[in-house]
Amino acid sequence: MFEWAINRAKERKAHLLQLTTDKKRPDAIKFYENLGFKKSHEGMKMHFN
């Protein structure tokens, strides 16, 4: 599915393909890096009870 999305974005001349994941998921991060994604920034959240 990811390879399809990446190829589709390239076909449509997209300039950016972005995803988010929890940095506590090292296996997911490695998976995404193996697809060609690069770490780019830290996210910010505010939780309310």
Image: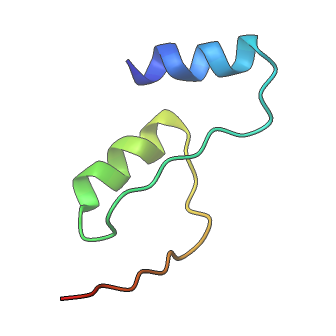
Residue farthest along the front direction in this orientation: 49
The outermost residue toward the left is: 49
Q: Where, quadrant-wise, is the C terminus in this rendering?
A: bottom left
Residue at 59%, 71% (x, y): give it: 41
Residue 13: % across, % down? 82, 20
Q: Is residue 40 above or below residue 8?
A: below
Res 18 → quadrant: top right
Q: Nearer the viewer, residue 17 or 37?
A: 17
8 in relation to 36, above or below: above
Q: Residue sitting at 55 percent across and 61 percent down?
A: 39
* Position of residue 47 measured from the top left corner of the image (x, y, whole percent): 30, 85
The quarter of the displayed image where residue 37 is located: top right
Quarter where residue 48 is shown: bottom left
Left or right, 47 with reference to 8? left
Q: Residue at x 33, y 69 (%)?
A: 23
Q: Is residue 18 above or below residue 4?
A: below
Lateral position of residue 20 relative to residue 37, left or right: left
**Front one among 42 and 29:** 42
